[in-house]
């Protein structure tokens, strides 16, 4: 009577090292300028920055300007005596015609990295299940 071999999952098969009795030969690999990972992250960053600059920025600026400055008792916070309520000019100063600031750049770059790494992780997971 044969003992039943435990079934090995696809994940376990892909992670296990296959050994053979032959001598291991090394293959020389050359470096490439652009790998799939670099292209994916760069593409997602470019897409997120372009969407942030040309699509979402005008809408956000329009809503902010329509809202106007904060008021209390009919006058602005700065006029009411709050000296820290004045907008920080150094953070929002930019040479971009639309006003895309450093804060916007960091935020949309972070969004691009998050999308890129999640795309890479999902692709890796799909390949692992094959």
Image: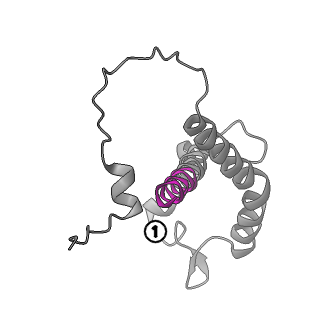
Q: Is residue 74 above or below residue 60?
A: below
Q: Is residue 100 visible to us here?
A: no
Could you say which quadrant of the image residue 82 lies in? bottom left
| Residue 116, position as x, y percentages in the image | 57, 50
* Position of residue 71 in the picture relative to residue 21 (left or right): right
| 66 or 34: nearer the viewer | 34
10 Å neighbourhood of mark 1: few (<14), some, or many (≥20)?
few
| Residue 8, position as x, y percentages in the image | 33, 63
8 magenta-colored = no
| 83 or 46: nearer the viewer | 46
123 magenta-colored = yes
* Position of residue 110 in the picture relative to residue 49 (left or right): left
| Residue 19, position as x, y percentages in the image | 29, 37
Say how many tags the image has: 1
* Overall secondary structure of the magenta section: helix
Q: Is residue 97 above or below residue 124?
A: above
Q: Please tell me whether mark 1 sits on a helix, a strand or a loop.
A: loop
Residue occupied by mark 1: 81
Q: Residue furthest bottom?
A: 73
Q: Residue furthest front?
A: 1
Q: Residue at x 55, y 49 (%)?
A: 103
Q: Is residue 104 visible to us here?
A: yes
* Position of residue 122 in the picture relative to residue 47 (left or right): left
- Region rendered in magenta: 115-130
Considering the image in quadrants, where does the N terminus appear?
A: bottom left
Q: Residue at x 55, y 39 (%)?
A: 37
Q: Residue at x 36, y 65 (%)?
A: 9
| Residue 14, position as x, y percentages in the image | 39, 51
Q: Residue at x 72, y 58 (%)?
A: 57
Could you say which quadrant of the image residue 18 lies in? top left
């Amino acid at each position: 009577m044969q003992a039943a071999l435990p079934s090995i999952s696809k994940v376990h098969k892909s992670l296990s090292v296959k050994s053979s009795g032959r001598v291991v030969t090394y293959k020389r690999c050359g470096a490439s300028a652009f790998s799939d990972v670099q292209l994916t992250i760069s593409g997602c960053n470019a897409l997120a920055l372009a969407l942030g600059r040309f699509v979402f920025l005008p809408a956000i600026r329009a809503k902010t300007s329509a809202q106007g400055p904060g008021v209390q008792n009919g006058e602005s916070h700065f006029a009411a005596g709050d000296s820290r309520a004045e907008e920080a000019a150094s953070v929002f100063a930019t040479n971009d015609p639309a006003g895309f600031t450093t804060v916007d750049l960091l935020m949309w770059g972070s969004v691009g990295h998050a999308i890129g790494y999640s795309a890479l992780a999902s692709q890796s997971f799909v390949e692992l299940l094959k």
